[in-house]
Image (cartoon, helix red, strand yellow):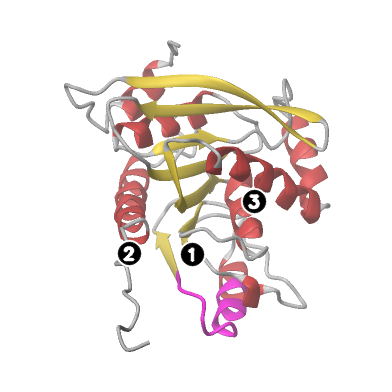
Amino acid sequence: MTDTFSPAHRKLLNTVPLRAASRIVTLEVPYEHDGEPMEGYLAVDETHEGRRPGVLILHDWGGLADYTRVRAQMLARLGYVAFAADVYGTGIRPEGDDAPKEAGKYYSNLELLRARVAAGFRELQANPDVDPDRIVVIGYCFGGSAALEFARTGAEVRGVVSFHGGLIAHDPSDADAVRASLLILTGGSDPVVPDEAVVAFENELRAAAHVDWEVVTYSGAPHAFTLPEADHYRPLADARSWRRFVDFLEEVTAERPTVDADPGE
């Protein structure tokens, strides 16, 4: 399948060089949640052999569109199996004022939001090219919030990453359920995620001592700072957050050594 991207999206894609031998294959993937049709997007380098880490990508409040597809292809170029989930459902791609209204349906029903992410996770986990023990979930804006909510379900994933996502502290807290390492990449000038929201979120995580977490704040970066077609795009913050994410991805998806049984047992 061939994607036709805008110049801004093509420029973003090409920040990750394509290896000469690579063959990136993309596919629209139908699946369901509770009988509701979904349509995700898969990107994979078919020249790789054997199972490899997978990355589940969660879209912003505009739904699964070209920006999310570009990020999936960037990850495929790095050797990961990337699957962009469809939180809203097939054909639901809101624009303008309809986008916050659609996202609001899920912000007001976090159980549904978590379940929609879980449906996409199961689809990726079942992919024969994916090592189901080495999956990371990431999201942008609305998708960042969704990724963090999924972590609160106790999902067995290696890592969860939020790019300029809303930070929702829970009272009572359910942070004790988190099993994934968390990476939160946020803008220092984001009115959607003010300092007090960051502090409240950090304080909740501090109370769950076992959780591995990191918050990185980018100076001067507003909301949606990684979206190249948005007025709020900040190339430096985008590049820095991507590099930190790639380092995190390599760290948490590394092969874990096999622990041999005690021969005396």
Mark 1 and mark 2: Cα distance apart in space: 18 Å
Residue of label 2: 256
Query: Where residue 74 sits in the image (x, y, percent)?
Result: 35, 33
Q: Residue at image x 59%, y 85%?
A: 207
Disc nearest the viewer among 1 and 2: 2
* Nearer-the-camera pick, 49 or 13: 49
Q: Earlier in the sequence, mark 2 or mark 3?
A: 3
Query: Where residue 166 sits in the image (x, y, percent)?
Result: 62, 56
Residue of label 3: 146
Q: Is residue 120 shown to the viewer in this render?
A: yes
Q: Which quadrant of the structure image shows residue 30? A: top right
Q: Residue at image x 45%, y 20%?
A: 26
Quarter of the image with the C terminus in it: bottom left
Judging from the image, what secondary structure is the residue with disc 1 in?
strand
> Mark number for residue 128?
none
Q: Is residue 188 shown to the viewer in this render?
A: no
Mark 1 and mark 3: Cα distance apart in space: 13 Å
Q: Earlier in the sequence, mark 1 or mark 2?
A: 1
Mark 3 crowdedness (10 Å alpha carbons): few <14, some 14-19, many ≥20: many
* Circle 1/circle 2 CB separation < 8 Å: no
* Circle 1/circle 3 CB separation < 8 Å: no
Quarter of the image with the N terminus in it: top left
What amino acid is labelled 1 in the image? Leu
Mark 2 crowdedness (10 Å alpha carbons): few <14, some 14-19, many ≥20: few
Q: Earlier in the sequence, mark 1 or mark 3?
A: 3
The magenta stretch spans which residues?
201-213
Residue of label 1: 182
